[in-house]
Amino acid sequence: MTDQHPQQPAQPYTQAPPIYPAPQQWPSPPADTHGRPGQEAPQPARSSRTPLIIAGAAFIAVLILGVGGWAVYDRFIKEDSGIAACKAMAADKKIDGSPKTSGEDDKMTEAEYREARKIFEDSRYEKIREHGTALMDIAWQVDQMPDGENGGALALLGPMGTHVSGLQTACADEGYIVKMD
């Protein structure tokens, strides 16, 4: 049988030219002129977020400075309320700094109790806070007892003595000698 399809001799591989031109040969794209030759393309507008970002950063910076300033004032500049009470008691005044008066009804109102307790409660000094608030609580309990029933107050003498001496010691540790009658 004869070969109906004659085979051609094998040819060596030759490199074909590139289908697309190399990147150096690519033409630059024409400027978008919106159909009007001779005009340059408009410049892109600046991002409208930039002022918002700057305003947000400024707000956060002011907030941090404000909170930091308040913390410095509250911690280091403003006098501690417990220390102020120790100073007042050492100067023979009421714990709020007002002068002591005699001849008045010594009954404490609830508002006065809460105010006096808050003075000690807001102190940064643990011992002043502990003994001052406990002493105000005991004084309030004794003050609320009906007249003539002093027997209940006897039960509070032990804790009262503990907290009076504890507050005196805490004030003395800070340089204020308090005499409580």
Image: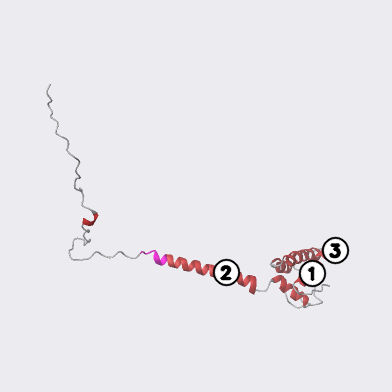
Question: Which region shows up in magenta?
Answer: 47-52
The part of the image, by quadrant, that contains residue 134 is: bottom right
Q: Secondary structure at mark 1?
A: helix
Which residue is under mark 3?
A: 157
One can see residue 75 in this view: yes
Q: Quadrant of the C terminus?
A: bottom right
Q: 17 or 140: nearer the eye?
A: 17
Amino acid type for the residue under numbered disc 3: Leu
Q: Is residue 14 left or right of residue 53?
A: left
Residue 34 figure quarter: bottom left
Give me the C-alpha separation between circle 3 and circle 2: 44 Å
Residue 98 point in image, percent of width and height = 73, 77
Q: Secondary structure at mark 3?
A: helix
Q: Is residue 167 left or right of residue 14?
A: right
Q: Earlier in the sequence, mark 3 or mark 2?
A: 2
The answer to whether residue 95 is visible is: no
Q: Is residue 49 magenta?
A: yes
> Does 46 appear in magenta?
no
Q: How many marks?
A: 3
Q: Secondary structure at mark 2?
A: helix
Q: Which residue is mark 2?
A: 68
As drawn, the residue found furthest toward the top would be 1
Dot placed on the residue nearer the N-terminal end, 3 or 1? 3
Q: Which mark is residue 169?
A: 1
